Image (spheres, rainbow, N blue to C red):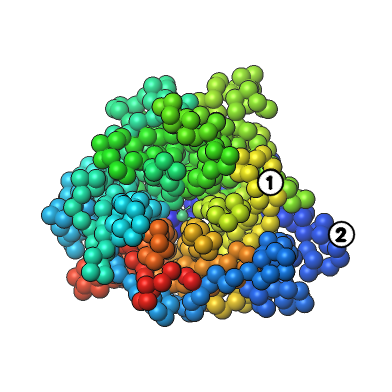
Amino acid sequence: MSGLPPVFPAIDPDDVSSNGSANRTFGEVVEKRMSRRVALKGGPAAAAGFLVAAPAGTGPAAAAGQSGQSATAAARGGGGGRPPRALLGFRAVPTSTADTFTVPEGYETQVIIPWGTPIRPGGPRWRKDAGNSADEQAQQVGMNHDGMHFFPLGSGRQGSRRGMLVLNHEYVDQELLFPDGSATMTPEKVRKALAAHGVSVVEIEERDGEWRVVDSRRARRITGSTPVSFSGPVKASHPSLQAADEPRGTLNNCSNGWTPWGTYLACEENWNNYFGTQDPSWQPTASQLRYGVSKSGGGFRWHLADPRFDLAANPNEINRFGWIVEIDPMNPNAKPVKRTALGRVKHEGCTVTESRGRVVAYTGDDQDGDYIYKFVGQGHWRAQRALGRSPLDHGTLYVARFEDDGTGSWLPLAHGTGPLTTANGWADQADVLLRTREAADAVGATKMDRPEWIAVNPENQDVYCTLTNGSGWNSAVSPRKPNPYGHIVRWTEKNGDNTATTFDWDIFVLAGDPAYDAQAGTDESNVFGSPDGLGFDGDGRLWIMTDVSNSSQNLASKGYDNIGNNQMLAADPRTGEIRRFLTGPRGCEITGLAFTPDQRTLFVNVQHPGEATTAWGTPTPENPRAVSNWPDFDPEGRPRSATVVIRRTDGGVIGA
Ligand code: FEO
Ligand code: CA
Ligand code: CA
């Protein structure tokens, strides 16, 4: 999410920390580590050595007379002096400020499932004046596409030509969603906005060289109104979850995940934005303050028309949000399940891997000064499933602590362990999970710089996390102060075992523009800022997607004038080389990626093209095309989030 609610603020609310704990910031940890290196090895170049994985022959390390690789990248490279095989085989595209989607020479694109596409052919057709009703929207692809996964149908070649595409719809731009904009709020508008949120499950196939939606009994929409169930230590019957009706809906589904048993994970991020109240007597609890809950919410103003979102009238409804939601893409009758053992935070995503038969799920809490978490399942996940238990319901939730000697540890958030005792006011494990942020504060986790997506390298199980930026005014959670460009942190779990409770870490790349920041590990083939989306392909290429806030995009005053529109890059984690792969249209972020098993088709999402930006302007009901008219370029239409299919014209592996 660009973080911009419908009422366009001067600063991204995610950049404002709500963490008042005395825990150390990652910036402080990095600073101390750098000063230790200066003392041990002599000179600032040695200090910078662990920070930057620069392209070979470029970047500050090369300028300082070193190899262009970070020490760690070199150590993890081909081994035995053998140069690693080149992973990146395309020519970098330049930055762009145009209202277009650009891919490298030799690649082609096709736009599919823009907002408003019927999820089954024959469903209600898209109306370019945004005149579709709430009921129609509930049968159409939602708005603001985000995390996404492709579940193949069939094996071999067939499995790369037909499958279920499952994707999140993070939030809505109410100026574009309604024909009359967002000046007024009505119950029908709230219903439509809820219907444009959630998850789309569509069946797609490639036929005659084109991908298309096919009719499918598996297709469905999960929206902000869909009945859901709860599982794990926080039950639907928990007193804190009792509200006016049965639990419904999922909101602000940002990044995603998928499990080895074939389910999809949607993650509830900035759920606090949807709740508010006009009741002057309402006061936030300490826990609500920690989650950024406020009377005015994030500007959606649904509480003015629907008491479900009124903090005073329906105080427990908000406790039903902030969870990881498991969805079966193959069974349209299976209720989405909120897996409470994974904690309640502003979950950016949920990246699942396996180690020694156990399931491990990583999740970042995207707000300035918040934390990185990991859930380790109890026992072998296959055995758990054989017993009829979900591997995501039983296990231990940990939070990360980074040390300035380059090590780190995972601190358990388990009731009765450390400070999380009844004597200290923690009633039980459900209480720990409902107040996950406070529990993590209490155990001494490290404050990070807006943790976004997390990806696990299939080649060696190393873990990478985008820390998108830290431009907030009341914290300095960064190796740079302030840190408008972000960085990618990487860690190796002890013995390569993702269930381990200790790790070693370094920084894979400091994003940014060398014209403004000498520390940035970039050059013109890859200058970027605010990394957000992240994922590995089967060959070990690391794909990086950016979400530069619309209040910074293309502005010299923010140091972003050379970086252009949001983009996607590919990195070779063994050499540190990074190349720009695509650029998006105006006002969008690039997010969500999915490959077919043969890696010859890549699906990427363009989210919120045409949203209000400081550089380009603000869409209005009279002119929804003020910023962008991508992808339709219809003179009477409006910009729409969509999925872009990317293939090589020679049919080869993407990125190679
Ligand atoms: Fe929804 Fe943190 O991006
Ligand atoms: Ca973001
Ligand atoms: Ca994001």
Instruction: Look at the picture and state if 269 lies above or below 538.
Output: above
Q: Tell me residue 399's x, y (percent).
A: 61, 39
The disc at residue 495 is: 1
- As drawn, the label of residue 436 is none
Left or right of 135? Residue 175 is: right
Q: Residues within 10 Å of mark 2 (few under 14, many from 20)?
A: few
**Which residue has dot 2 on it?**
40
- Say few, some or many: other residues with alpha carbon within 10 Å of mark 1 (under 14 / 14 to 19 / 20 or more): few
Judge: label 2 CB < 8 Å from ligand 2.
no
Does residue 57 appear in the picture of this structure? yes
The residue lying furthest to the top in this view is 423
Is residue 51 positioned above or below 32 on the image? below
Q: Measuring 36% from the left and 76% from the top, which residue is drawn there? A: 649
Q: Tell me which amino acid carries mark 2.
A: Leu
Decide if residue 322 is on the left or right side of residue 577.
left
Q: Quadrant of residue 1?
A: bottom left
Which circle's residue, 1 or 2, is located before the other in the chain?
2
Mark whose residue sits in front, 1 or 2: 1
The answer to whether residue 19 shows anywhere in this view is no
**Where residue 91 sits in the image (x, y, percent)?**
49, 79
